[in-house]
Amino acid sequence: RSTLFPYTTLFRSWVTGPYYDTLGVQPALGRVLRQEDDHPGGSPAGTVAVLSYNYWQDQYQGDPNVVGKVVLIEGAPVTIVGVSAAGFQGANVGSAADITLPIAELPQLFPERARNLNAGSWWLRVLMRPKPGVSVAQAKAELTVLWPGITKELVTTIESAAVRKRSEEHTSE
């Protein structure tokens, strides 16, 4: 759960940049997260997020001006870039997120949780869609070879960002 403005609590989902593209989900409004959004420090526009369709309807009454709106999450500015498609509930069966954020932003928004980003994290899952003509067995075999390198690179990048942020916070005090 996270605080959006002082009065609203919402459920969030942390995903990598190609999450929506991999699942073939198009936005109802604006755009979905992209690879360039998923870097420590955010995209060139800063930290961005996508609202779920239901949250957009419930909290913003379907206002199309929500795209571009800056909200505060844990005191940090986050720009809403889009709204997910109606009916899209995310990858967590039985638990729809209100807002989706790039996973590389976790250390910036929640530095105390950065240690939860490692190759053995129970809450991190891989979603993939094999290219046409690639069998599930082929995809699993390739992922078995690639996965150790992927996790090492992801964890190193995100941990480095968290260390930099903590260092900057102590320097500015």
Image (spheres, rainbow, N blue to C red):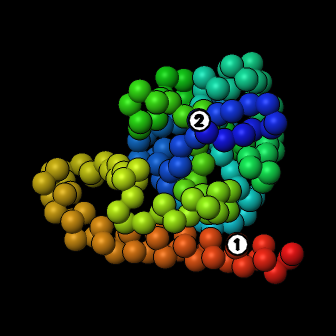
Instruction: Answer whether residue 31 is visible to the viewer in this image.
Output: no
Numbered badge on residue 11: 2
Q: Secondary structure at mark 1?
A: helix
Asked whether 95 or 139 is in front, the reply is 95
Question: Going by the picture, which residue comes out furthest to the right?
Answer: 173
Q: Residue furthest left?
A: 137
Q: Give the number of the disc on residue 165.
A: 1
Counting from the top left corner in percent of width and height, residue 165 is at 70, 72
Is disc 2 placed on a helix, strand or loop?
loop
Location of residue 38 with respect to 155 vertically, above or below:
above
Disc 2 to disc 1, how far (Cα)?
24 Å
Q: Quadrant of the C terminus?
A: bottom right
Q: Position of residue 143 (x, y in %)?
A: 25, 63
**Residue 76 picture quarter:** bottom right
Picture coordinates of residue 124, whole percent (x, y): 40, 53
- Is residue 168 among the parts visible in the rendering? yes
Whether residue 42 is situated above or below residue 15 in the rendered picture? below
- Indicate the position of residue 123 as horizontal and vertical percent values: 41, 50
Which residue is at the front of the view, 22 or 76? 76
Residue positioned 15% across, 51% down in the render: 135
Task: Kindly identify the residue that appears in the image at 12 percent across and 54 percent down.
Answer: 137
In the picture, the quarter occupied by the N terminus is top right
Amino acid type assigned to the residue bearing label 2 in the image: Phe
Q: Nearer the viewer, residue 39 or 26?
A: 39
Relative horizontal placement of residue 111, taking residue 172 as reference (left or right):
left
Q: Are marks 2 and 1 in contact (CB under 8 Å)?
A: no
132 or 111: nearer the viewer: 111
